Image (tube, rainbow, N blue to C red):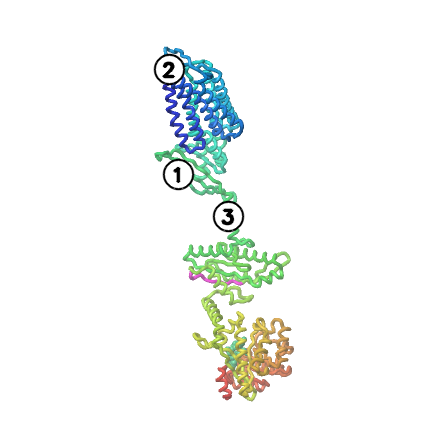
Amino acid sequence: MRIAFSVLFFILIALLIPCAFIAKRSRKPIGASVALFLSAIIPPILGNLIIVASGNEIFSSVGCYFYFLGMDLSMYGLLVFTFDYCVIKRPNNGLNRMVNLLLIIDAIQVMLNPFIGHVFDTEMIMLNGYPYYRIRPYLGLTFHRIVDYGIFFACFFIFVYKARKSPRYYKERYIVIIVSLAVTCASLTYFIFSRTPIDRSMVCLGVFGILVYHFSIHYRPLRLLDRMLADLASDIPDALFLFDMYQKCIWANSAALRLVKVENEEYDKCFDALIDLFGPPNDDREDWMTRRIVGHGDDARYYTLEWHTLKDEAGRSAGVYMSVRDNTAEQQTYQQEFYNATHDSLTGIFTREYLYEMIHKTLMENPDETYYVVFVDVKNFKIVNDIFGTGFGDYALKCIAKWISTDICEDCVYGRLAGDTFGICLPKKYFDEQMLDMQLQDFIVVNGAMEHHILIHLGVYEVIDRNIEVSVMFDRAHLALSHIKDEYQKHITYYDDEMRKKVVWDQNISAQLHEAITLRQLRPYLQPIADSSGKIVGCEALVRWIHPENGFMPPGAFIPVFEKNGMIVEVDRYMWRCACEILSSWKEKGIDLFISVNISPKDFYFMDVNSEIRKLVRKFDVDPKKLRIEITESVMMDDLDNRMDILRQFRREGFIVEMDDFGSGFSSLNMLKDMPVDVLKIDMNFLGKSTDDQRSNTIVQNIINLTRDLEIESLTEGVETEIQYKALAKMGCRLFQGYYFAKPMPVDEFMKFCSLE
Ligand code: C2E
Ligand code: CA
Ligand code: CA
């Protein structure tokens, strides 16, 4: 027995020392208190080892001191450990201080025992033939035991309390401690009352220390982890299947069972059910990470499958888990967003950006097909909106979109380019011009009581170079439309490269105009105007552009461009100025001729023509009579009253107002009687070239007669022959202009022509 217990105590001490050391070195927060407790229980075990092993009175007494003082230390360590283990903050109050004080007092009174002998002494007994020194307790020892038991029970109850309060999975870490404490306590009590010389409770205390070490430093609550992981897997919305290495499903979470419609946890059925749903996996399972669609149309559901193989350390497959995520909601949102972004909200057809993308794709995918890109323009759509309201306008646009999608070409690519324009790309062979033209002849939109004929024009560009941007193709198709303005008879027009060249030309000359004026590349040419006796009485100033690269440019090459973009204002202002300069120099030289200047209808939009010319006349000190104002009938087309006022104003100020190009356009004899004009310019080119032509003769004769009655002077321009001249003079015409006399010419030539130099 002596040897057995000695060895046992020794082993315990030998185990506790490294355990204390490891606990101290561990990074765990509880490590320090575990190390303290383990270190504290070594002295009492050592004390008992000395008592048991020595069999000597003095050594046994020394062992007893180790034992009792060590127990005080152990209780202190137990207390510290208890609070740490139970994760309770140790109270720093009077009770705590009292406990510490009691332990100190006890330790002191034990140490006083050699002098007073009030704690214990030893008596020898023989056991199995060996002498043992047994403790004989006195009052001091009773005090010692009360203190230690008190602390011991306090700790015990703290553990019991924590065990009761903790969740189930945490209880085991407390229960082990509680049981060990109870066993230790029971064996200690047994030792006290049995009065055996060997304290067997030290074995329990040692084992308890090792358990403390294990549960505090190494133990991981595996059941807790298991449960947590299982709960986690059960609760996630993804379907999870676990298969063993023989493809047998060993577990599936509730989402998985719902997915494959397996009930009562019949996991065996899962694999087949999965194959029914998604089809068989690839040979290489690693690849079974795919997106699958189950069902069609609105009922389609979208899944992402992931297949993971678990491998052991040697790389052998140990099992497989598979997750299935239902992406249907995400897919539906994505598809909805994609639809919204790519489809026009009103008509439901492609938006411009998406149309461009799809056309590009179509062209690239079908390199051998010839395609048309068609620009669909709804004419005067603003008026439709204004008259019938936007509701009808929207309805009309929907009808057009429907017409495009059903009548033009079901399979072609089409979309809405902007408000009232649409775009189509279709194989040339499907473009049936005749049929479309017929449909467009009477494209009538009827909405309830309202109905309206919508004028639609199609500009067509044949795709020759597929590498140019789709937007440019539409620009070209659009450009083609500029050839049919607001016509009701012609609906379809084709782009040709001349159109593009024309645009480039227009842009170039527009960009150069400003500089051309500054550098005086624009020149006034003068065309003489004669009276009936052949005498030159004045001239018309006509612009020419002496272009550094293009050479001599007649007004027909640029005036229409500037008329269109409004830059004509610059040209005219410049020409009026030139005319005033010439008149001013003539005045100095005593030359008594007038100059007619042209005023474009556009000028009236962009400036106060009247004040502009008045300022020039004043500046150059020119007699207003010498600067004749040529306007065309189209000036009177809009804002008639205001334009009349302007003309009257000119006349009041002494200018002579001429109505140019009479006979062209909408010449109205009726209008003439109210017109504040002094001269009517009758253009022979509009009336017919030959004076032999009886009909035009009659017309001219009548116009001349009428002007005479209205007291308006008549001037025929475009007089090319003597016969014309004579005939017109005979008819009573007073002024003549035309190649018969001279073509327009530079100012100095004009001077020579008139023998003014
Ligand atoms: P317009 O004002 O009717 O000018 C008369 C045009 O008839 C001139 O053409 C002139 O050269 C041409 N002409 C004169 N006599 C004859 C003839 O016997 N036979 C034929 N076939 N033609 C004749 P041009 O100079 O080419 O001017 C063309 C048009 O350009 C002008 O028609 C006028 O509308 C416009 N234009 C010319 N210069 C200016 C300008 O400074 N300002 C504005 N706004 N327009 C101008
Ligand atoms: Ca003119
Ligand atoms: Ca004219």
**x, y (%) of residue 710?**
64, 81
How would you rate the neighbour count of disc 2 (Cα within 10 Å): few for under 14, some for 14-19, many for 20 or more? some
Q: Amino acid at mark 2?
A: Asn
How would you rate the neighbour count of disc 1 (Cα within 10 Å): few for under 14, some for 14-19, many for 20 or more? few
Span highlighted in magenta in the image? 457-465
Instruction: State which tag comes first along the sequence, 1 or 3.
Output: 1
Q: Is residue 431 above or below residue 754?
A: above
Q: Of tags 3 and 2, which is closer to the observer?
A: 2
Outermost residue toward the left in this view: 314
Question: Between residues 365 and 21, which one lies in front from this camera angle?
Answer: 21
Q: Amino acid at mark 1?
A: Arg
Label 2 sits on residue:
56
Identify the secondary structure beneath mark 3: helix
**x, y (%) of residue 159?**
50, 25
Label 1 sits on residue:
285
The quarter in which the N terminus is drawn is: top left
Q: Amino acid at mark 3?
A: Gln
Label 3 sits on residue:
335
**x, y (%) of residue 644?**
63, 75
Q: CA distance from mark 2 to mark 1?
A: 76 Å
Q: CA distance from mark 3 to mark 2?
A: 93 Å
Per the picture, the main secondary structure of the magenta-coloured stretch is strand
Identify the secondary structure beneath mark 1: helix
Identify the secondary structure beneath mark 2: loop
Instruction: State which tag comes first along the sequence, 3 or 2.
Output: 2
Question: CB of residue at label 2: within 8 Å of ligand 1?
Answer: no
Pointers 3 and 2 in contact (C-beta within 8 Å): no
At 53% across and 81% down in the image, what residue appears?
581
Residue 695 shows in the view: no
Which label belongs to residue 169?
none
Whether the magenta-drawn stretch holds residue 461 is answered as yes
Res 447 quadrant in image: bottom right
